[in-house]
Each structure stands twice: as structure tokens, then as C-alpha cells.
Image (tube, rainbow, N blue to C red):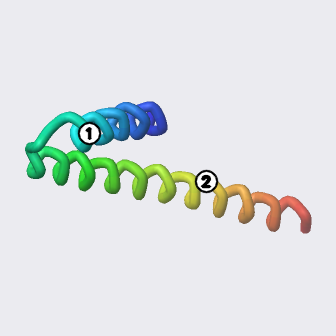
Amino acid sequence: MLDEEILELRRKLDESITKEKNYDKTYRLSIELDKLITKYYSKKLTKSKSVDIWKKTSNK
């Protein structure tokens, strides 16, 4: 799942920050994590809007 991917990538990023001096790798991991988080919230927002639309139409 997407949330599991985020957790794993966050773990890798944390490890990269604390143990490595390869700033390019840390930067790439950070960008990748940002993209996953954006995707996660985008899906969550889309799902929320779908529920709102369903509620509006079912109350009529």
C-alpha cells in the first residue's frame, strides 16, 4: 500500500540523513517521498470528495 511505501521511504531517508554523506541520494529520497505523500493525500482527497457527493445525492 501507499502508506507502507511512505513509511519505508521515510526510514531510508532518515537513515541516509544520519549515516550517509551522499547528499544527492538524500535529496532524491526526499523528492521521492514528497511525491508519494502528494499522491497519498491526493487519493485521500479524491475519496473524500466522492463520499461527499454520494452523501449529497443520497439525502435528496
Amino acid on which disc 2 is placed: Lys
Q: Secondary structure at mark 2?
A: helix
Residue 8 to residue 33: above or below: above
For residue 60, side relative to residue 16 (left or right): right
Q: Position of residue 23 (x, y in %)?
A: 12, 50
Front-lying residue, 51 or 11: 11
| CA–CA distance in space, label 1 to label 2 | 36 Å
Amino acid on which disc 1 is placed: Thr
Which image quarter: residue 46?
bottom right
Viewer-nearest of discs 1 and 2: 1
Residue 25 to residue 4: above or below: below
Front-lying residue, 15 or 38: 15
Q: Position of residue 15 (x, y in %)?
A: 27, 34
Identity of the residue drawn at 32% across and 48% down: 33
Residue 54 to residue 28: above or below: below
Numbered label attached to residue 50: none
Which image quarter: residue 53?
bottom right
- Sequence order check, earlier mark of 1 and 2: 1
Looking at the rendered image, the quarter that the C terminus falls into is bottom right
Q: Secondary structure at mark 1?
A: helix
Front-lying residue, 16 or 58: 16
Q: Are marks 1 and 2 in contact (CB under 8 Å)?
A: no
**Crowd band around label 2 with a 10 angstrom C-alpha radius: few (<14), some (14–19), many (20+):** few
Q: Mark 1 = which residue?
A: 18
Identity of the residue drawn at 41% across and 58% down: 38
For residue 43, side relative to residue 19 (left or right): right
- Residue at the farthest right position: 60
Q: Mark 2 = which residue?
A: 47
